[in-house]
Image (tube, grey):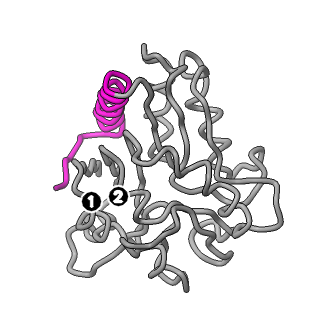
Amino acid sequence: MIETFANADALADAAAAWILDGLADGLMARGHATLVGTGGRSPGPVYDRLSQAELDWGRVTVTLSDDRFVSPNHPDSNAGLVRRRLLVGAAAAASFQPLRYDVADEDASAEAAEPHIRPLVPFDVLMLGMGEDGHIASLIPGDPRLAQGLDPAGSRLVQGVPAGLGAPPLPRMTLTLPALASARRILILTSGEARRRVLEGGDVRPVHVLAETTTSPLRVLWTP
C-alpha cells in the first residue's frame, strides 16, 4: 500500500505525473476534468510541477478537500495556497471552486459550497495529505460530527468542522467520505516515521476508513 521515495522531490515528481495522467483521462473521456487539492506542506512542490504542465487547463476545475474558515488572503487558507502555487502559469486557465464563502460561519459556508461541489462528483483526481492522528481532509479524530462525516451512506458532501481541532485549530469546511471516496484516483502524500506507523498500525483512523471504502485506485506516497 505504501510507496517509498528517497526524497520529497522524487515523491512530487511521481505525484504530479499520476495526477496529470488522471486529468488527461478525464478530459479524453468526458471533455472536462476535476482535481481536488489539499493544504499543508506536501502538496506545494506538486502544485509547482502541475502549474507548468502542458494540459488543457481551461477544461479543468480545481477544488479542495478542505479549507479553513478564513479569508483567502490569510496565511492558513488552503485556497490561498492553491492560488499561489497551482493556479499560475499554464494552470491559471483552470476554474476554481472554493469551499469558503463570505457567510456567518463554517457550517453556513459548507452549506453554500454543497450545491457547487455536487455536480463535480465523482472527481477525476483527489490528492490528500495525512496528519499524525490519521486524519484526512478535515475529518479529524475528536470532532463530534466525525461519524457523520465518515458515514459512507451520508447525504452531505461538505460539512463544517468546529474550531479547536487540528493545527491550526481554526473552524473548517471539509468534504465528507462519500465525496472523497467517489474520486476516480486517490493519492495520499505523507512523510515521516510517525505517519508511517499510523498507516501500518492497528487502530482504524479516517485514512483507513477511506482506503476500505473506495473502490478506486488509491496510492500512498511516503518519504522519510
Could you tell me residue 213's position as x and y percent? 27, 66
Work out whether residue 69 or residue 45 is closer to the camera in this orientation and state it: 69
Look at 67% across and 63% down and name the residue there.
111
Q: Earlier in the sequence, mark 2 or mark 1?
A: 2
Q: Residue furthest left?
A: 1
Query: In the rendered view, would you say 105 is above or below 186?
Result: below
Residue density around tag 1, few if under 14, some if 14–19, many if 20 or more, within 10 Å: some
Three-letter amino acid code of the residue under disc 2: Ala
Quarter of the picture holding the N terminus: bottom left
Look at 33% across and 66% down and name the residue there.
207
Could you tell me residue 135's position as x and y percent? 43, 68
Residue that badge 1 annotates: 214
Q: What element carries label 2?
A: helix
Residue density around tag 2, few if under 14, some if 14–19, many if 20 or more, within 10 Å: many
**Left or right: 175 with respect to 171?**
left
Residue that badge 2 annotates: 181
**Left or right: 36 with respect to 160?**
left
Q: Is mark 1 on a helix, strand or loop?
A: loop
Work out whether residue 198 or residue 18 is closer to the camera in this orientation and state it: 18
The magenta-colored residue range is 1-29
